[in-house]
Amino acid sequence: MHPVLARYLTADVAKETLRKQQAGGALDPEEQFFAEAAKAHPRQAAILMDVGGRVLSSDAQAALVLLAAHASARAIQEDSELTEATKKAREALTEEGASEEETDAFIASILLEEAFGYEQDVDSFDREYVKESLGEVPALAALTKEAVDALFVGFVKASKDDAERKVREVMARALFDIAWAEGPAPINPEHIEALLDAQVADKPEEEQEEKVHATAHLLQALAKEGLMGPLRLSRLRAMLGEEDA
């Protein structure tokens, strides 16, 4: 988990930074990132500042996570190891018509995935994974409906027989509908879990194996197209039981 994200998942810390900013106090760099995120999202900041007591409502929790994620998205622009990858990712999204708000949200989602998407030590920040994820963005941003259709057709055509073709059709269509219904984005653990729940759970064992195997091959096909890096591929295949993380 990015340290700025971790710092501002505590409501008291977040509110104190906002009070400090409102009072005109000097802010350290991390506080400045959070203050900028709050300025860009005044509704969430207002929800957070209205919180009384230590138990947060669902709306307040969501506001806190959003502001913390957007603060960390600002912070990585100043990280020497991530500056260039962040710049290229943001430029790619902008060139494809994304607004500044949409671009910020896309980058923030990558940091949330790194923090909460996998079973790992939340006290550490996997900079390499974030760098790889940012590197996936240009290819994803440029992905058109026609290109997705071509991916689908190519993946299905590579089947060895009619039975495998039918399985590949089902799994590819389902994953694309789940992950890319609102536009191409990195395939993440939530997408894989939703796919398994919808298409694999409660099915006969042989059918489960066929569908899981087809999904693993689909992930490999996406990786060959530059839409998924090796770290993401390994982790998602591990979720399928197809490869060690």
Image (tube, helix red, strand yellow):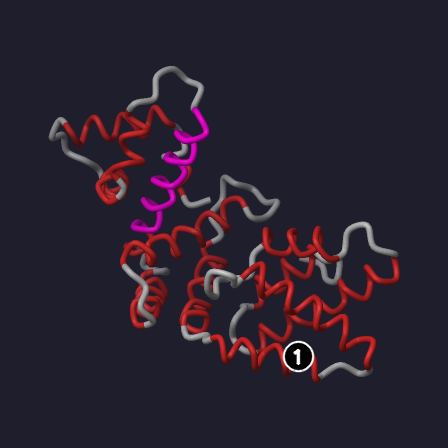
Residue at figure coordinates x 63%, y 58% from the top left:
235
In the rendered image of this protein, does residue 46 appear above or below residue 235?
Answer: above
Most common secondary structure along the magenta stretch: helix
Q: Secondary structure at mark 1?
A: helix
Q: Nearer the viewer, residue 25 or 156?
A: 156
Residue 11, quarter of the rendered image = top left
Q: Amino acid at mark 1?
A: Phe
Residue at figure coordinates x 59%, y 45% from the top left:
120
How far from the left and from the top, in percent, is residue 126? 49, 52
Residue at figure coordinates x 27%, y 30% from the top left:
46
Residue at figure coordinates x 49%, y 75% from the top left:
145
User: Is residue 80 shown left or right of residue 139?
Assistant: left
Magenta region, residue range: 57-75
In the rendered image of this protein, does residue 158 appear above or below residue 118?
Answer: below
How far from the left and from the top, in percent, is residue 230? 58, 67
User: Is residue 101 shown left or right of residue 212?
Assistant: left
Residue 2, quarter of the rendered image = top left
Badge 1: few (under 14), some or many (20 or more) residues near its Cα, within 10 Å? some
Q: Nearer the viewer, residue 10 or 59?
A: 59
Query: Magenta segment: does it hold 159?
Result: no
Residue 199, quarter of the rendered image = bottom right
User: Is residue 37 shown left or right of residue 236?
Assistant: left
How far from the left and from the top, in percent, is residue 184? 48, 66
User: Is residue 236 shown left or right of residue 102?
Assistant: right
Q: Residue under circle 1?
A: 155
How far from the left and from the top, in percent, is residue 23? 13, 26
